[in-house]
């Protein structure tokens, strides 16, 4: 037995060619994963993680409970101290995933009577957290400071005790573009707002040692909270919220996704520790940026500029309208040996469906040239 309403929703997805299905591992050339620096496959990080655990006499497989009960093993303090130092912050608090971090932050920080102003393309995990809060939320047009300012102007008459939170991402996962963070910081100062930035797709890619776009722009002291994740360029799992010591203390007391879940196991924390040390030493980031530059040159060479959203990040999106069309082109690429994922509506708006190219340090220039040359045969220039 299965509820009729739910069955109908599945059938609607099938009719729109938008039904999500779990994929399988393959040996295709990777233009789809978030493993921008190749850290998930790094034998150096793997071996250093093992040495770190043995050196600290850690043989536990699991955390045994939440951090407020039995799960707060010593590695948490070691790794959180590393993170706060690396990211020039008073504190860091580790969560089990980026989703947990965003839901945990936005569900407990904004209070009844507060306002949340968020970019219309903000990540689903932030939207879900906002829904769980008691604050009023309003979206502004994507990366549009003028629209954000107009919302802030309307807030001038709110009670003095009302807090305003402005929320964006430093690199947007479905577009690969970035907002004017300096301009947004100035708006926060002008209107006495708190700035929250999700740095998931900037960590490891931008900034000195891969510390992110906020630090690259020297804005860390102007940001109330940063969300950093370890499942992208860091190549492992988990996330952290970095900010003031007061913020950390508040989250430990009120963030439900932190309080009511089993903590990460020691092995994951040791992997984060090893990966961050590798960030300092790696030459992969320079190679990644070289590949990004080559990809952008090949876009111009093949006269594909009108299809792509402008991006300096590792994410480059080619807009091809229609779920059927974009899925067919992705399948053609896969038959040619390239793993490129179609992004379908409703994940993105209708007529904004796209091929999402994720670039990596380990992609060859030959593969980059070939994949964009192949794209010209699938679209009408």
Image: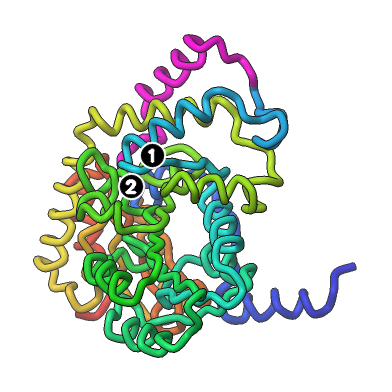
In the displayed structure image, the side of residue 141 where residue 74 appears, left or right: right
> Can you give x and y, in whole percent of width and height, for residue 260 in the image?
71, 46
Residue 149 in which image quadrant: bottom left
- Give the camera-side residue of 271 and 359: 271
Residues marked 1 and 2 touching at CB (< 8 Å):
yes
For the C terminus, the quadrant is bottom left
Residue 282 in which image quadrant: top left
Residue 44 in which image quadrant: top left
Find disc 2 in the rendering and name its residue. Answer: 203
Q: CA distance from mark 1 to mark 2?
A: 8 Å
The residue at 41%/38% (across/down) is 235
Measured along the vertical axis of the image, is residue 237 above or below residue 113? above
Magenta stretch contains residue 341: no
Give the mark toward the camera: 1 or 2: 2
The total of numbered circles placed on residues is 2
- Give the camera-side residue of 258 and 154: 154
The residue at 39%/80% (across/down) is 352
For the N terminus, the quadrant is bottom right
Mark with earlier residue (1, 2): 2
In the displayed structure image, the side of residue 208 where residue 148 appears, left or right: right
Q: Which residues are magenta?
A: 37-60
The residue at 43%/23% (across/down) is 46
> Can you give x and y, in whole percent of width and height, for residue 143 in the image?
30, 75
Q: Is residue 380 visible?
A: yes
Find disc 1 in the rendering and name its residue. Answer: 234
> Can you give x and y, in whole percent of width and height, for residue 234 in the image?
38, 39
> Can you give x and y, in whole percent of width and height, for residue 87 in the image?
32, 42
């Amino acid at each position: 037995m299965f509820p009729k309403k739910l069955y109908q929703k599945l059938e609607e997805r099938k009719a729109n060619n938008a039904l999500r299905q779990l994929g399988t591992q393959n040996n295709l050339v990777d233009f789809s994963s978030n493993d921008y620096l190749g850290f998930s496959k790094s034998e150096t990080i793997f071996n250093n993680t093992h040495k770190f655990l043995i050196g600290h006499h850690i043989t536990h497989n699991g955390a045994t409970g939440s951090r407020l009960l039995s799960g707060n093993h010593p590695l948490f303090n070691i790794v959180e101290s590393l993170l706060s130092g690396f990211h020039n912050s008073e504190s860091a608090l580790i969560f089990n995933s980026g989703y947990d971090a965003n839901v945990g932050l936005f569900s407990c920080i904004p209070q009844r009577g507060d306002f949340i102003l968020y970019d219309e393309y903000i990540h689903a995990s932030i939207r879900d957290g906002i829904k769980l809060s008691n604050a009023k939320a309003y979206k502004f047009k994507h990366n549009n400071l003028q629209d954000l300012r107009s919302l802030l102007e309307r807030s001038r008459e709110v009670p003095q005790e009302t807090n305003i939170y402005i929320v964006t991402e430093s690199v947007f996962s479905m577009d690969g573009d970035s907002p004017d963070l300096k301009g947004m910081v100035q708006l926060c100062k002008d209107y006495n707002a708190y700035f929250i930035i999700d740095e998931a797709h900037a960590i490891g890619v931008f900034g000195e040692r891969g510390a992110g776009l906020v630090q690259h722009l020297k804005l860390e002291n102007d940001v109330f909270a940063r969300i950093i994740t370890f499942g992208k360029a860091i190549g492992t799992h988990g996330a952290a919220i970095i900010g003031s010591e007061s913020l950390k203390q508040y989250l430990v007391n009120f963030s439900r996704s932190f309080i009511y879940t089993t903590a990460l196991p020691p092995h994951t924390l040791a992997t984060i520790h090893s990966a961050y040390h590798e960030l300092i030493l790696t030459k992969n980031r320079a190679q990644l940026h070289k590949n990004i530059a080559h990809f952008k040159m090949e876009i111009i060479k093949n006269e594909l500029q009108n299809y792509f959203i402008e991006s300096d990040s590792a994410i480059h999106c080619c807009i091809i309208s229609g779920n059927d069309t974009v899925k067919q082109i992705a399948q053609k690429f896969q038959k040619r040996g390239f793993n490129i994922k179609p992004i379908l509506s409703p994940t993105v708006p209708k007529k904004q469906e796209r091929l999402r190219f994720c670039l990596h340090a380990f992609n060859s220039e030959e593969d980059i040239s070939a994949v964009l040359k192949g794209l010209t045969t699938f679209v009408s220039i």
